[in-house]
Image: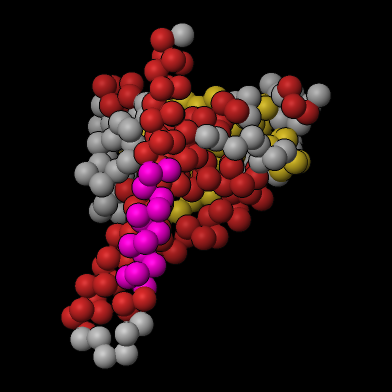
Amino acid sequence: MRHADRLATIGQLAAGVAHELNEPLSNILGFAQLVQKFPELPSQVFKDVERIIRAALHAREVVTKLMTFARPKLPVLSEVNLNQLVSDGLYFLASRCAKSGIELVRQLSPDLPEIVADSGQLHQVLVNLVVNAIQAMPNGGRLTITTKDNQDGTVSLFVSDTGVGMSDDVKKHIFVPFYTTKPEGTGLGLSVVYGIVTAHGGSIKVESEPGKGSCFEVILPVKGNNDDSR
């Protein structure tokens, strides 16, 4: 109960901060884009304005994550083929893996039963986990995406990497909002993932060792085995 109360307080704070930041960020972005259109702008000034725009876009992305955490949208449920969702999501992430020197391995189980889920939110889960894995392999490595029918009314999505791994202490805090070990991290990616998965009646597990990589397992109920689809 204390944990739930603390999360509610953090959510209210995050919503307030996000609301207050939206207007000045929009002004910064809008005026920077106007300046960039000035016909006689020196090249160095143009580059500096480009940096301002990139920084503002990054800040706006952080605000979006804050809003997602503070006021999560109710899932819009439909029948989803997890293998197809993974294939579609990896289509956009494969080039980023290649640029980072990461081998992308797909191990998708055939005849996977369908789930009832919000495909957009599960896409966000996949992207967050894959991006985390990429960031954990700064010198390249192997990223393995696996789906599995657990034969117990659930299916699993595994996202495994051969990256830097995590200590037991870090693992205890990774789903806590605003906790991060990255200099430029927001600490919201995995807390948003956790919220989406639990809202779908699922759960998430992680195994990791320093220097040996990490494996996240997202477990979701198949069609007919969650409260929303009965």
Q: Is 195 placed left or right of 83 in the picture?
A: left
Q: Is 187 placed left or right of 85 in the picture?
A: left
The region drawn magenta spans 19-33
113 above or below 153?
below
- Which of these two is toward me, 204 or 75? 75
Q: Position of residue 167 (x, y in %)?
A: 26, 26
Q: Tell me, yes or no, whether the highlighted magenta stretch contains residue 60.
A: no
- Please report the residue visible at 45 percent of the width from the left and 22 percent of the height from the top: 8
Q: Principal SS element in the magenta part?
A: helix
Q: Position of residue 35 (x, y in %)?
A: 31, 77
- Please report the residue visible at 55 percent of the width from the left and 60 percent of the height from the top: 91
Q: Is 184 placed left or right of 192 in the picture?
A: left
Q: Position of residue 94 (x, y in %)?
A: 47, 60
Give the number of marks: 0
- Please report the residue visible at 61 percent of the width from the left and 47 percent of the height from the top: 120
Question: Residue 19 lies in what quarter of the image?
Answer: top left
Q: Can residue 121 be seen from the camera position used here?
A: yes
- Please report the residue visible at 37 percent of the width from the left and 61 percent of the height from the top: 27
Q: Position of residue 2 (x, y in %)?
A: 41, 10
